[in-house]
Image: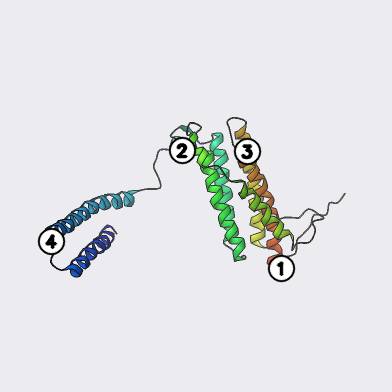
């Protein structure tokens, strides 16, 4: 892999130098020096590129730094793996995995595009929750725009236009895509509870809690929408009272 990348890199640089030579023919000394400088710079970058690629090739998923039940927050602080921050962003990560299951089905392209965008937003929220309080500048950069909450509301409104009025509770089930939407809804509620619990111990921006609250509503509407899209009848709950 290293050799292949280096060969392509060298070929690109050298080809540009040779094209320059072919176009201008014999060169004054200044131009010749410029070409030699370019080739020297290329060799310098070749060394850097080699080191970078080899470092990447050696990177591993396992680091062994968490073998004693601790991990690092963004910022370097070491905490227990059952720390409230990990409970919060770990549940966000779990939610994101369930959302990926919804996206694995051949839903409408616009639905899957929205879902992909939501997954991206959840990664940002996870980063926000994983960032130590003393890295305030990074936490500020991870702030979310109000338009993201408005997007959820707009998408829900569009889906509900094609759905019958809701008169009963719905039993989760039916098509797998709809079922995974219900799972995402319940995991999202748990994530919201974990973040609320975290907010009792440290500062959490209100937009995170608001977003998660709205997101769980979105997945409920999405479950109904996907049931209709896949021609699956909703099963309502009829209490025996």
User: Does residue 115 appear in this view?
Assistant: yes
Q: Earlier in the sequence, mark 3 or mark 1?
A: 3
Figure disc tally:
4
Q: Nearer the viewer, residue 188 or 24?
A: 24
x and y percentages locating residue 216 in the rendered image: 67, 49
> Horizontal placement of 202 versus 20: left or right?
right
CB-based contact (under 8 Å), mark 1 and mark 4: no
> Horizontal placement of 230 versus 17: left or right?
right
How crowded pointer 4 is (Cα within 10 Å; few <14, some 14-19, many 20+) is rated as few
Residue 231 badge: 1
Could you give the CA–CA distance between mark 3 and mark 1, rounded to whole angstroms?
Answer: 38 Å
Could you give the CA–CA distance between mark 1 and mark 4, rounded to whole angstroms?
Answer: 76 Å
Q: Earlier in the sequence, mark 3 or mark 2?
A: 2
- The residue at which mark 4 appears reads as 28
Kindly identify the residue that appears in the image at 61 percent across and 33 percent down. 199
Q: Of tags 1 and 2, which is closer to the observer?
A: 2
Q: Of tags 1 and 4, which is closer to the observer?
A: 4
Could you give the CA–CA distance between mark 4 and mark 3, rounded to whole angstroms?
Answer: 66 Å
Q: Earlier in the sequence, mark 4 or mark 3?
A: 4
Q: Looking at the figure, which quarter contains the N terminus?
A: bottom left
The correct choice, above or below, for 22 with respect to 13 in the image is below
Residue 206 badge: 3
**Secondary structure at numbered mark 4:** loop
């Amino acid at each position: 892999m290293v050799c292949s990348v280096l060969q392509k890199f060298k070929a690109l640089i050298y080809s540009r130098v040779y094209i320059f030579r072919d176009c201008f023919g014999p060169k004054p000394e200044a131009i010749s020096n410029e070409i030699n400088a370019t080739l020297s710079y290329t060799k310098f970058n070749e060394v850097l590129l080699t080191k970078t690629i080899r470092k990447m090739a050696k990177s591993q998923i396992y680091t062994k730094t968490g073998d004693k039940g601790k991990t690092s927050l963004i910022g370097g602080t070491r905490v227990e793996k059952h720390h409230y921050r990990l409970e919060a962003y770990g549940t966000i990560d779990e939610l994101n995995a369930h959302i990926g299951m919804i996206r694995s089905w051949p839903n409408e392209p616009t639905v899957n595009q929205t879902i992909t965008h939501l997954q991206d937003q959840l990664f940002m929220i996870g980063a926000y929750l994983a960032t130590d309080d003393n890295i305030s500048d990074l936490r500020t950069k991870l702030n979310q725009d109000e338009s993201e909450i408005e997007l959820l509301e707009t998408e829900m409104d569009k889906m509900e236009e094609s759905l019958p009025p809701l008169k009963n509770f719905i039993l989760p089930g039916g098509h797998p895509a709809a079922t995974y939407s219900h799972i995402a809804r319940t995991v999202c509620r748990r994530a919201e509870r974990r973040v609320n619990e975290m907010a009792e111990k440290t500062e959490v921006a209100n937009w995170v809690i608001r977003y998660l609250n709205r997101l769980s509503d979105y997945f409920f509407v999405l479950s109904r929408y996907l049931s209709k899209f896949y021609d699956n009848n909703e099963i309502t709950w009829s209490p025996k009272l």
